[in-house]
Image (cartoon, rainbow, N blue to C red):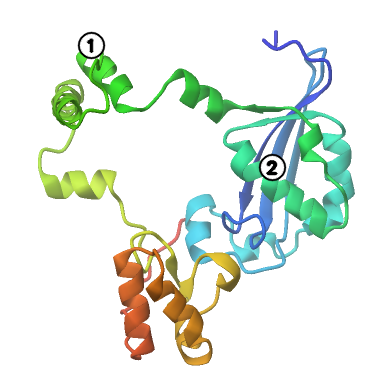
Amino acid sequence: MFPIQLDRPLIVFDIEATGISPRADRIVELAAIRIEPDGTEVSGYWLLNPGVPIPIETTAIHGITDEIVASQPTFKDKALEILAFFGEADLAGFNAGRYDIPMLAEEFARAGIPFEADRRRLLDAQRIFHTREPRDLSAALNYYCGRAHVDAHGAEADVRATLDVILGQFKKYTDLPRDMDTLDRTFNPIDPFNADRSGRLRWVDGEVTVNFGKKKGAKLKDLARDDPSFVKWIIKNDFPQDTRAICENALKGIFPEPPRQKRLPNS
């Protein structure tokens, strides 16, 4: 029996796309399960041609290439079919409120079809998870050390609690690496397609490109030549130091070396 008493259908869905920006990116895969009030389940699946190239770094995540979707319909082709499947149902997903729903709403808007997400109730499994299983220092101290963090948010108490948590983690997880190099690589992985640590600048086809805002997708080399005021804006504003340094060098005609090409799954 489904644990929620439904008074209308519930759509649990997930999206894979060309990226994470609802405005700039496009859906390539949409899977959904429609749960009726009587518990009946109906599945829906759409593989879609986004109409734009799928970045190589995104393909590395979900495995969908331009070749796979070349002969598939676009979202606009399937918009009415998808809308009929969703109907007036409520929505559910994991991080759906921040990613899947905005992405879906943008696709419907581009197709000229209203999709009133704000009129639908939302069940977001991630929010339940984060609410019931908090991931703050107090929760970690209780989990790994079995004690309350009574002096939370005092620097001296917090630093001692943090050290105790680290010791507790190494006691609990005996397979953890025991050297800093391996620990750093394991738990602080750097995306090889990031030109800077934050990913504000990305490698696309061997070129440093902007990965945010209205200039997303623009090559830094082109901006340094044709729109240097934008590059100077980055330098003068509150961006990470390594991002600013790359931009400062770009204005001097100096650019970093591209990363070595990585082999993609199934390639």
Specify few, some or many for label 2: CA neighbours under 10 Å numbering under 14, 14-19, or 20 or more. Answer: many
> Is label 2 in a helix, a strand or a loop?
helix
Q: Quadrant of the N terminus?
A: top right
Residue at the spot x=50%, y=79% of the render? 230
Q: Is residue 152 above or below residue 4?
A: below
Residue at the spot x=60%, y=70% of the render? 214
Residue at the spot x=30%, y=51% of the render? 189
Q: Quadrant of residue 10?
A: top right
Asked if disc 1 and disc 2 are in contact, CB closer than 8 Å, the reply is: no
Viewer-nearest residue: 218 or 238: 238
In three-dimensional space, the C-alpha distance between marks 1 and 2, rounded to whole angstroms, equals: 39 Å
Residue holding disc 2: 101
Residue at the spot x=69%, y=39% of the render? 31
Q: Quadrant of residue 19?
A: bottom right
Q: Is residue 171 visible?
A: yes
Q: Label 1 is placed on what type of residue? A: Gly
Image coordinates of residue 22 in percent, x first then y, are: 65, 55
Residue holding disc 1: 146
Q: Label 2 is placed on what type of residue? A: Ile
Labels 1 and 2: the sequence-earlier one: 2
Image coordinates of residue 186 in percent, x first then y, are: 25, 45
Q: Is residue 267 visible?
A: no
Specify few, some or many for label 1: CA neighbours under 10 Å numbering under 14, 14-19, or 20 or more. Answer: few
Image coordinates of residue 23 in percent, x first then y, are: 67, 59
**Marking on residue 214:** none
Total of numbered circles in the picture? 2
Left or right side of 24 for 267: left
Q: Is residue 233 above or below residue 131?
A: below
Image coordinates of residue 246 in percent, x first then y, are: 33, 76
Viewer-nearest residue: 125 or 251: 251
